[in-house]
Image (cartoon, rainbow, N blue to C red):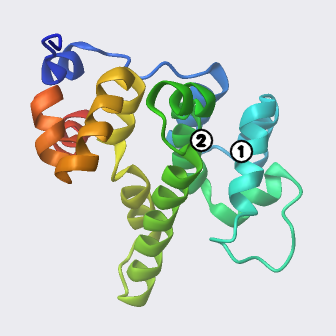
Amino acid sequence: MSRTIDVAKDIVQNNELMALPEAVLQVLESVDRDEISIDSLSNIINKDPALTGRVLKIANSPFYGLAQKVISVHQAVMILGMTTVKCLTLSAAIFNREKLEHDVGIDIGMLYSNIISVAVTSRKLAITYGYSSPENAFTCGLLHDIGLLYFLHHYPIEYKLILSNIKESGAVFDEEKKQLGLTHPEAGEMIVR
């Protein structure tokens, strides 16, 4: 018998949806200020070795198709842009790879690759069709599965059961509704609001 979960209530009542490291909070606050420089943002990121590694890894990923290797955070910020770095920083902070792989049994690398692929494709489509803000399209693509990330972060045991049931039913949304009361797109909409 599973416990009764009210995800919608949890989202509404929880002011801190996901605990974020200090460096991530500084990046998010800094990027929201118009006067932040690339140097200032780079300095904040450089104070956190894990965040530095993740930003560099993302900048050097095949998704960006750069001819030369990005070797500094400053260079990564210049290439990726402030908004992209903000979103990447947030998503990197959400992922606790070891915990999620252990608790839920999913390949976080594959999930993250999928999320980045959607973000990059969104930006490319925006550029192709003349959308005025390709970085906003990238941000939307990056955050499209924020509800899924929330489920994985807050309900790993329940989501492991969902994944197990999906193998038989093939109905992701039905299983999410049954176990958690709403789908991950619905949770994502609530989180974004």
* Relative vertical location of residue 150 with respect to residue 79 in this rendering, above or below: above
Residue at the limit of the structure toward the front, as seen here? 168
Report which residue position mark 1 lands on: 54
Report which residue position mark 2 lands on: 89
Whole-percent x, y for residue 78 in the image: 73, 62
For disc 2, the neighbor class at 10 Å (few under 14, some 14 to 19, many from 20) is: many
* Relative vertical location of residue 159 with respect to residue 65 in this rendering, above or below: above
Q: Is residue 57 left or right of residue 13?
A: right
- Choose between 91 and 173: the one closer to the eye: 173
- SS state under label 2: helix
Whole-percent x, y for residue 67 in the image: 82, 80
Task: Give the position of the N terminus as an image quadrant.
Answer: top left
Task: Tell whether label 1 touches label 2 (CB within 8 Å).
Answer: yes
- Residue 17 appears anywhere in the view: no
* Relative vertical location of residue 75 with respect to residue 93 in this rendering, above or below: below
Of callouts 2 and 1, the N-terminal one: 1
For disc 1, the neighbor class at 10 Å (few under 14, some 14 to 19, many from 20) is: some
Whole-percent x, y for residue 5 in the image: 16, 16
- SS state under label 1: helix
Q: Amino acid at mark 2?
A: Thr
Q: Is residue 80 left or right of residue 130?
A: right
Q: Amino acid at mark 1?
A: Arg
Mark 2 to mark 1: distance in Å? Answer: 8 Å
Quarter of the image where one finds residue 53: top right
What residue do we see at 80% from left, 50% from top? 73
